[in-house]
Image (spheres, rainbow, N blue to C red):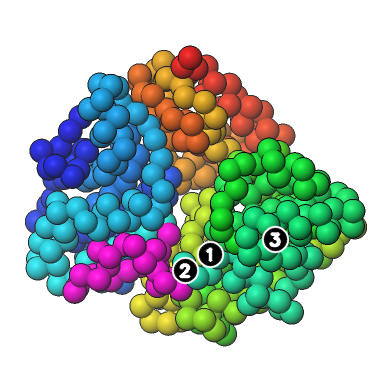
Amino acid sequence: MFSDQEDVLFSDLHLKEDVLYFFYVGEIKADCLNQFVAETLGKIHGRKFECISIVPDIMESYPHRNIMVINPLAKNLYNQTSRKYSCRMGAKEFACEVSRSAAVRRLAEMLIARQGRLYIHVYESLPQLELCQLPGTVLLGPEGSISSIWNNKLYQLQMLSGQVPLMDYRICKNVRELYAGVESVAQEWSEGIFVSRPYSAAGANSFIIRSAPELEDQEPLSRDTYFISRYVPHELDPTVLGVVGNEDDVFIAAIADQEIENKNSFRGSAFPSSLSHKEQAEVREHARMVGRVLGRSGYRGIFGCDFIVDNQGRIFFVEVNARKQGTTMEMCCTLENALPPGAPSLMEMEYHAVVHNRLPPGRQEIKEAIQGLFWRTYNFKVEREVVTNYFLPMDEDERELFRQVRQKGLEHRMIIVEHPGHKRCVMPGSFLGRIVAVATNREDLDRDISLGKFMLEESITIRE
């Protein structure tokens, strides 16, 4: 299980003389995007590129060679228990561990000396990824400090006030103000009060209540600043993926509907959106405005933008994800199967945005749903510690899944990706797997997702 390098848990590097390499740093869930990055770099530089992926994920099998695994928590758990644990790391902590890894730095310096430069592709740009400060590295993503500022929800609300429709909100500088704020709005905001810390994602660091006494159930509360906003009852949670080339050049890829459990926890997405044509046009323009504001601040690259649509058809901004988000791979595959050959991919657009401060020519936006193409994803997280009974291997990657339905005549197909493998202990909050379904109709998607959930549930035993 262990690499012979002290700070690397697993490594299977095998470098070729006639290939140029780039790094991917992030969770395995976005590793699939690297095939598009490799093609982009090859197209631009006229050389073959391959990826070296540096990930925290503990798996029985990885999707390709040249994987480096860094996860001190999993390594410590193995040393203490002799069990192989699948456990998530915080993005900032992982960026720090990668940057201080002697093995990673030696490899980076060797590749820079050999190639002249080293591209580093990331899921999320973070200031803690100091590896990008090495001379000769090129970050394929927005600048880390700008991303970090924009992922602060209070900053988003202040910067986008008057630009997009916002829900009523209040800022609470400490827990005392939080209690007072909830009490002051509880009667007026009778449908619910959304409470969040400035940095939150996928339901973490946020919750929904109706009164101040319910805050007692959320203890221990942090000393950090909170904000509260009116919870608006709604059925649709559209999400938009875009690319910022500059403040005047924003590309909108497509709109999907998020699947939200327990009013606040993201679990997946579905395409095409169920919004009306008019609502989709409005959401697109709101997202484009967000992209322009991002661009004015110096942000360059892919971003996500989430909204809700209430029961009266009113649209409200929820948040910006100043990074790639859960639909990025599916959006790449959607564009590939919808646009003419040669149209730039999302990864090619991000490259030009970051390197050239503009988007490439030939880009085309999808204005309407694509005839006969539906997809849905579901992220299967575990809430208690479980042990896997067997491995659910991946038959093919997502890109091939889309091609089989779009180009080869299959009506529907489902795959499970990123299963950790046989006899793995999976910690609470970790992914057991991700289900991806593609079909020519929406009904088959729902059946395939249900089958995927059943297969994942059957693959585990809950640890007592």
Picture coordinates of residue 357, whole percent (x, y)? 42, 82
- Under mark 3, the amino acid is Glu
Name the residue: 49% across, 45% down: 403
Compare marks 2 and 3 and give the one earlier in the sequence. Answer: 2
Q: Which residue is mark 1?
A: 151
The residues tagged by marks 1 and 3 sit, at their Cα atoms, a distance apart of 23 Å
Disc 2 on helix, strand or loop? helix
The residues tagged by marks 1 and 2 sit, at their Cα atoms, a distance apart of 6 Å
Given residues 151 and 249, the one toward you in this image is 151
User: Which quadrant holds residue 87?
Assistant: top left
What span is in magenta? 124-146
Q: Which residue is mark 2?
A: 147
Asked if marks 1 and 2 touch (Cβ < 8 Å), the reply is yes
- Under mark 2, the amino acid is Ser
Disc 1 on helix, strand or loop? loop
Residue 454 vertical position relative to residue 337 in the rendered view, above or below: above
Q: Which residue is mark 3?
A: 177
Labels 2, 3: front one: 3
Observer able to see residue 40:
no
Name the residue: 62% across, 41% down: 219
Residue 96 vertical position relative to residue 137 in the rendered view, above or below: above
Disc 3 on helix, strand or loop? helix
Picture coordinates of residue 371, whole percent (x, y)? 68, 51
